[in-house]
Amino acid sequence: MARQCAGPPWHRRQCWQAANFSVRYIFEKHPARLDLLIETAGHIRAGLDQLDWLYQHLCAKTCTFCPEPCCLSADIWFDLKDLLFLHAAGLPLPVQSPKKRSQMPCAFLGPRGCVLARTSRPWICTWYLCATQKHRLTRENPGRLSRIQNLTQQVKALRITLENRFIGLALENKRK
């Protein structure tokens, strides 16, 4: 009997590998139909690059002094949209999911923060602004907060588009 992948999605290495194999399989079955997925991933990447630039100063001023960093306490994982983005953007896949168990810190937390580029992180690591960050932006740079919120909504919509396009391919594959 096969072991089930319970808990945060793909928290065990075997489940992570199986999920990535499944995505890769659908991509390989439809090479001529990947243009829209790749284009959408390009737009997502551009949005993440802009968000990264907006976050660099903010995170340097807040995360390094945080008594409870998200990377230590939050449940973090790659969702399906994250996997689809990594595959469609041609980015290297992390060797594992960020956490094996809830009480563990993120596997990608290094001495100076996340060792993954923003484009390779789970989406939750980008869209989430803690109360300290929101307060600081509201006080010091409300225009930057508004820009972050707008970009976050744009990337979120693009991620949904990417997932819907992939599901269309997967359903087409199932019908054959």
Image (spheres, helix red, strand yellow):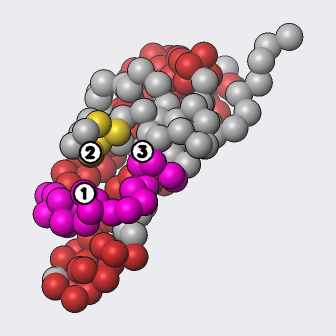
Amino acid on which disc 1 is placed = Thr
| Nearer-the-camera pick, 165 or 139 | 139
Q: Secondary structure at mark 3?
A: loop
Name the residue beneath numbered marker 1: 64
Amino acid on which disc 2 is placed = Gly
Image quadrant where one finds the C terminus: top right
Could you tell me residue 49's position as x and y percent?
19, 51
Residue 176 in sight from this viewpoint: yes
Q: Is residue 107 above or below residue 82?
A: above
Could you tell me residue 73's position as x and y percent?
50, 52
Quarter of image, res 41: top left
Q: Secondary structure at mark 1?
A: helix
Name the residue beneath numbered marker 2: 113
Q: Which mark is residue 122?
A: 3
> Taken as a whole, is the magenta stretch helix, strand or loop?
helix
Sequence-first tag of 2 and 1: 1
* Alpha carbon separation for disc pair 3 and 1: 20 Å
Residue appearing at x 42%, y 44% in the figure: 122
Q: Secondary structure at mark 2?
A: strand
Q: Is residue 56 above or below residue 75?
A: below
Amino acid on which disc 3 is placed = Pro
Image quadrant where one finds the N terminus: top right
| Residue 55 falls inside the magenta stretch | yes
Category of crowding for the residue at label 2, using alpha-carbon neighbours closer than 10 angstroms: few (below 14), some (14–19), many (at least 20):
some
Start-end of magenta stretch: 53-74
| Residue 149 falls inside the magenta stretch | no
* Alpha carbon separation for disc pair 2 and 3: 14 Å
Quarter of image, res 121: top left
